[in-house]
Amino acid sequence: MLLKRFSVFLLSISIAGTLSAQETKVQGPDGNLSVSFSINEGRLFYSLKNRGETVLENSPLGLYTNEGDFVDSLSLVDSEMDKVEKTYEQDRIKTSKVTYKANVLRLTVENGQKNKLSVVFQVSDHDVAFRYELPVWGERRSAVVLREETGYRFPENTTAFLSNMMTPMTAFARTAPSYESGYIADAPLAKAKSKYGFVFPGLFRIGNTGWALLSETGVSSLYCASHLSEISTEGVFHVAYPDMAQNNGFGSTGAAVSLPAVTPWRTITVGNDLQPIVETTIPFDVVEPLYEASQQYKFGKSTWSWIVWQDQSMNWKDQVTYIDLASDLGYPYILVDAFWDENLGKEKLEELVQYAKSKNVDIFLWYNSNGAFNDAPQGPRNKMNTSIVRKSEMKWLQRIGVKGLKVDFLGGDKQETMRLYEDILSDANDHGLMVIFHGATLPRGWERMYPNYVGSEAVIASEMLIFSQHARDNEAFYATLHPFIRNTVGSMEFGGVLLNKYLHKENKDRNKRLTTDAFQLATAVLFQNPVQPFALTPNNLSDVPSFEIDFMRNVPTTWDETRFIAGYPGKYAVLARRHGEKWYLAGVNAEDTPQKIKLHVGMLGGGLQSMISDKSDGTTYQSNLKIDKRGEVEVTIQPKGGIVIF
């Protein structure tokens, strides 16, 4: 990694004062993004413009701590500007090589008790990241951050695309919140009401002038995760900390910190169109690895029986069948899901690992996170929640050759839960194990922070298509939101590509799939996760066209570049991703009418040759691609249908 910092002294105020008579400003390198600051009646505010158009009106900043508040009676004591530039490589996100340049403004304020606090803004061409820095306060070297005043005030003509925070200790076995709610889409701000607020990320359309995506990154064991409050009567979304009821009421809602300390980064991605939203790397730009990988981890595709064949498949015969399926497809992994401890046991599991190895397949193994803060009965339970038991279990997993874990039912954003995430990841790395989290919170820069982290669910994923008619009815709608919201800030373990016409083992009569095969294939590209369990079943090898299986044999799960091509959240989405020298373009349509689009693909090079798409009757077919001299191709994406071009 190349890291350069240039310190450019812009402004230093050595005496306490206010910004009421002046405005401090920081712009991005290209001058388009501009953040301005002011202190009005002792309170600190910021505003944001893009190309002169307002993105955020005066929005509040500040913290409440047990050592004093940094909200009222503030005065400015120092202000200075820096620049940051770095390049880095990352093998598990949407782009493998990244260059990040930003201008940095550090504002230091003082409260009525003469304690200081700094707020640091980094502004790049399309992204704003900011956080608070807490110094040592006299003899105080520890503190608790109780809550934030931080807020976002959008112009009145803004509409919102938001997913509500689930009610704590509800849903299956009291495992909520698990970031598995639906969305309001293009809703007026006045309708952004939810008692428990909204999860990060949140997408906003600002009239006809542009888009903004709000999120956070850099959350580790040293802090709690946060979310957006419902809109206030003053028209402000605030950063909100976890509800006390989460995790069965155990753990505090704020963050205990050792001074000096920093908060996680709050991020704002801005664009005139959706390209910066889809292509942003800001969740990873402002964080660094917390430890080194104990080995080089191998990513790729996986089969898993549970998604379609369910709990009954957790037996030797069915797991061997799915190992054979993975081997036939050339997939490096099988995910062995819940209840393996009861139905197979450790001795037979060791035999299964050896059988898989004989087929050049490795195993990911499911675990319940613990039983202390939910009622989930699935086992193994109480193996991940304490250090002594966890390390012993992981030592055994390493010895028998398991390659990764899927840890489920974490259900909360408190600092106590963030510690559990980090402890699992750190111990797993010591034993050469990758980790997927399920029934879990949004990942916040974790692909870069934790080298053995390989994805989280945190979405209405494929299992809900099995369980819920509502999810099946809205599958296409949600699929056209995820590339612009959830999946753009972090890996998304969706577990999809369901090619059964009916979503159960018998593949008839019930749980009818409402999207086409081409739609399903497209999600293999649209949804990014470095280790992705796909929902293919053994019967698909003979009951779907061979070109569909060939596509699923070859489609990668890691990408070197991602580009926005076309789309509108909730209506349709078209993205292109590159693996090595080969591009894959995928699109889906949630509308009730066909979507005719002229795609500009010339910039992707001459390697695109084939297209899989749908006829009006829902039949999926493959054809040769015809690109005109201008590098354009006209396609039609059928309702609840899709295309893949490769």
Image: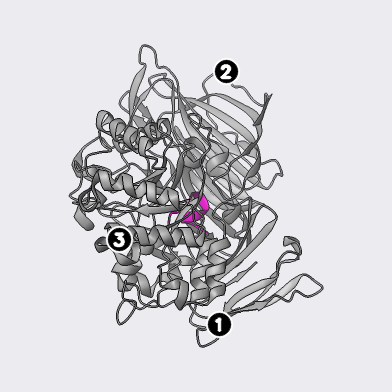
- Front-lying residue, 220 or 385: 385
Classify mark 2: residues with Cα within 10 Å, few (<14), some (14-19) or many (20+). Answer: few
Q: Earlier in the sequence, mark 1 or mark 2?
A: 2
Does the image show residue 551?
A: yes
Query: Does the stretch in magenta take in 485?
Result: yes
What amino acid is at disc 3? Lys
Disc 1 target residue: 594
Q: Amino acid at mark 2?
A: Ser
Percent position (x, y) of residue 296? 53, 37
Kindly identify the residue that appears in the image at 17 percent across and 49 percent down.
375
Magenta part of the chain: 484-493
Q: Residue at x 29, y 57 (%)?
A: 316
Total marks placed: 3
Q: Please report contact status of discs 1 and 2: CB closer than 8 Å, yes or no.
A: no
Mark 2 vs mark 3, CA separation in Å: 74 Å
Residues packed near mark 1 inside 10 Å, few (<14), some (14 to 19) or many (20 plus): some
Which residue position is annotated with label 2? 14
Q: Residues within 10 Å of mark 3 (few under 14, many from 20)?
A: few
Nearest to viewer (mark 1 / mark 3): 3
- Badge 1 marks a residue whose secondary structure is loop
**Secondary structure beneath label 3:** helix
Mark 1–mark 3 CB contact (< 8 Å): no
Residue 552 falls left or right of residue 506: right
User: What percent of the width, then of the height, locates residue 11?
Assistant: 64, 25
User: Which quarter shows the C terminus?
Assistant: bottom right
The residue carrying mark 3 is 317
* x then y, percent, for residue 193: 34, 59
